[in-house]
Amino acid sequence: MKWIPVALMGVAAFLGSLLGTLIANPLYARDPSSGMAPFLFNLVAMIVYLVVVIAILAAIPFAFLRLAWVGRRTEFATSMALGATRSELIRRARVEGLRMGVFASIAGIIAGALYVQVGPFAEHGWEPFTSQGLYPLVAVAWLLVMAIVIATTSAIYGIAMSSMTRGTPVEAATAVVADSASERGLGRLREPGRGIRVVLALFAFAWVVMLVDRLTNIGRVDFDNAAETVWLSNTVGVLAFIAAISAPVIGWFVLRLTAEALTGPVARALRYGTRGLGARSFAADGLMQRTGLRTGAVMTMAIVAALSTATLGTYTLGDHLNYTAERLNAPVAVTSYADGFFAEGPNPHPDGLEQTALDPSLLAALSADSRIHVVPFARLRAGDPYEYTELWPDGRIEESTRQDTYLAVDVAASDAVVPDGYRLLGLSDGTFVAAGEGNYSNVAVNMRGHEIVVAGVSEPVHPFWSSSRDSVVSLDWARERFGPAPISGALIYAVDDTVSVRAVVSEYVTPGQAYTYSHNEDYGVVMLSRAPLGASGTVLLAGLIIAVALIVAMSTASQRLRRREYATMAALGATPASLRVAPAIEAAVTASIAIVTGVAVGLTYWLATANPYLMSPGAPIDAGEALWHLGAHLGLFPWTSLAIGALVTVASAALASLVFGASMQQRTPVEELRTAMKEGVS
Amino acid sequence: MAKKTPTAEAATALKARGLTKTYGSGEAAVTAVDHVDLDIPEGVLTAVMGPSGSGKTTLVHLLAGLDRADAGQVWVGEDEITALGDKQLAQVRGRVVGFVFQGFNLLQTMSAKDNILLPLRLNGIPRDDEWLDGLIDMLGIGKELSRKPYEMSGGQQQRVAIARALITRPRIVLADEPTGNLDTHASAEILAHLRQSCRELGQSVVMVTHDPTAASYAGRVLLFVNGRVDGHITDPTPASVLAGLDALAGVQR
């Protein structure tokens, strides 16, 4: 087990190396945007994020290391009893961590660098060396990754040793210290010390600022007065970052208190109705024994469960939103106007809703065709025209004058294409689905504090970004705010894949009656590559592997620590069957508590952050929409995958404990006592 | 099922034949108990004495069914425990035999009182408050009942361990150095109680001890050396025990 922490840090180095190497792209790749400025920007971003991410993920190798060192507790205590100071032991552990960090980082970095060259990019084929002299600079990124991984590994070893040698040599050897340390830890939670109070205060302040920003949108950047507002935006951004990095600390305490609060009642419930001392009672006794080791392992498992749940939710929702947006991207649009979203053209129109109606008979005919879905819209033009320069992939530079163009869509009609599709993307009164430059619309979007200006009158709207290719507002809302307007176009969708929308439309549209647009498949389409397993599957699998490994390691360590206890009970008449089954029940209950706690926290975090109406600064405050999204997101969450993952984890925990427990029970109480003595178990 | 011994031997509480236990293998093999035959009569306090490393602790572990013999048989009363399955053996440990470990083996997470009551809970035996109070008074642990083992001295832990062994009123008590951590007065009190139990309740007690004075409370002393019974002393006195031990010194490997 002692190699698991090193392997995990190696994986961290591998990921860091991937990031570092990708800054300059693979050697054969051509990237016209490469240059020193983006390189440095990416490098700084990488360092900032990597430090935070590795610091959070370091909890996992730390937990494994403590579990691996359970059997060495007597060795440490004996060293102390023979004159070694605690600080000396910690220093030695740090040096060992340093060596392991060097080993892990070198292996991980080499693997990561090689993977970038031969991995997912290989499918693009080999091209001559095109990297623009940046590649040697990637060594800087590698060195930084190495430094971070080595420092973290060394710190993990030092902290683990520190936690295992607390107290006198006798206390360290007998693990009494583990119990009292755990009690001290709980005491800290109930009566926080200065350090925790500072973190709590910082966290509270940052969240208050974020809440104020949510309600008042103080952090928005006004493009016209950027100099005046950018400092505020940056300040809010920094505080948001503080809130984000202090969240895990708070999350740790929340998880721990919840897990502790659950353990007592569950143990009592487990014991309820048992006569004498059977497997359930033994398991309950085990659960009531609070040790630092168990707490650490449970907490780590809960963190893994929380991260897996939040990531699973995020990926699943992201996938679904992308799918929804793609489905709403109409292959064909029929319009009453010919000038698309260009301000200058053969048929210039004033600001506001388009007043030229699409031929009603054409609209009726199209709507009556069962092979297609028809979503009527009115075009909305707003804001001042602006010069637009576009760099095409083939090197052409195109300049034009454009004006913000929205599609005011009949949302009820779009529900036939994807039920509640636009609503899921965030669309409601006072918001718009933001797409920037799309197929049939074009909007220069202010990230926050966007306004639709028609004839000098501005209407604040909140943008919700998605992979939709058009900027969409609600038709009813647009008519209410900008006056009456006829239907000036229709988005046309196929009912199924066998239908050619273009062919169907051509049956109805006669020359001069309307204009037909279809989006160019070669333009503006971003195909997202997906892992064979799917992003959510990959996340779940990774979380599952870590959780199972943790629970197995914890169960084994827990049983080793209780070896003497079990042997004594066997000597006093406990049946072998009950002693075999008890650890399995204990492990299953422990895993369940960790999973329930982690899932609850992860789900809460995901639901809060994914809801467009909860924490998005500047979004309309609309409890109804917030609740609707809450329900929709809960409905989209892959409960089955989560349940399978949880069951596999709990079953693995029980099985591993059963196997280990059975191996223990094959031996006599005296043999077990002897082994316990050898391992320093009191 | 347990094999039954002839009725004529019913007065024997504990019997061993050809009992053997070896640790290690090859040249490193050490035979801790070497083809031992012995009979422990009912209602007698028996002391086992011998030099360190002579195999006394292994012997009592085997007699109590706590360890597996390589060869030989052990009978508790009429039941051959070396032929029992795990479940029946657990019942013997829980209801018939009481054991006092040299290292006490108290459960650190339980209070002294819970430790004492543990065998009753494990075996579903109803609690007898009068018996419990009597044990607590006799052992002088009334003030320690709510304390955890790590909050008690070695002597206090030893008294709790003795109370735990006696709480089920076992027919046979096996004790490994039961007075090793007690002062002379407390030792005398406990040994007197054990002897009284043997006489009045027909309980059989086998105790391993290094203390000739403690051994002198026994009705019989078995002298154990090199894994074998090398003789016994009936109605021992401290002086006769010392003499017996001196004689063993020349025999030990």
Image (spheres, coloured by chain):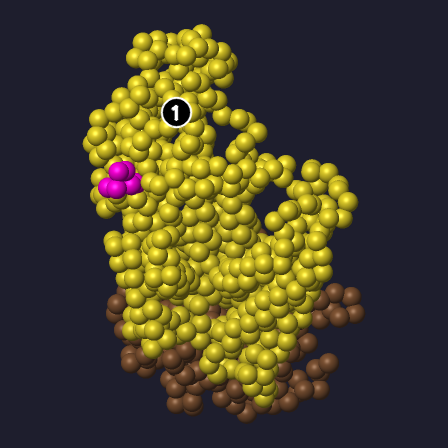
Chain colours: A yellow, B brown
Residue A215 is a magenta residue: no
Q: Position of residue A483 (x, y in %)?
A: 21, 30
At 72% from the left and 57% from the top, the residue drawn is A133
Answer whether residue A213 is visible to the viewer in this image.
yes
At 22% from the left and 26% from the top, the residue drawn is A484
Q: Position of residue A505 (x, y in %)?
A: 44, 12
Residue A5 in the figure: left or right of residue A379:
right
**Depth check, front residue: A646 or A588:** A646
Magenta segment, principal secondary structure? Answer: strand
Q: Secondary structure at mark 1?
A: loop
Crowdedness of circle 1 by 10 Å Cα count: few (<14), some, many (20+)? few
At 39% from the left and 15% from the top, the residue drawn is A514
Specify the segment rendered in magenta: A452-457
The type of residue carrying mark 1 is Asn
At 46% from the left and 21% from the top, the residue drawn is A517
Q: Chain of mark 1?
A: A
Q: Position of residue B146 (x, y in %)?
A: 30, 74
Residue A488 drawn above or below residue B89: above
Q: Position of residue B87 (x, y in %)?
A: 49, 51
**Depth check, front residue: A500 or A609:** A500
Residue B75 in the figure: left or right of residue A471:
right
**Depth check, front residue: A302 or A444:** A444
Hey, which residue is sitting farthest bottom in the picture?
B239
Q: Quadrant of residue A70?
A: bottom right
Q: Which residue is mark 1?
A: A347
Q: Quadrant of the N terminus of chain A?
A: bottom right
Answer whether residue B49 is visible to the viewer in this image.
no
Residue A453 is a magenta residue: yes
**Depth check, front residue: A423 or B101:** A423
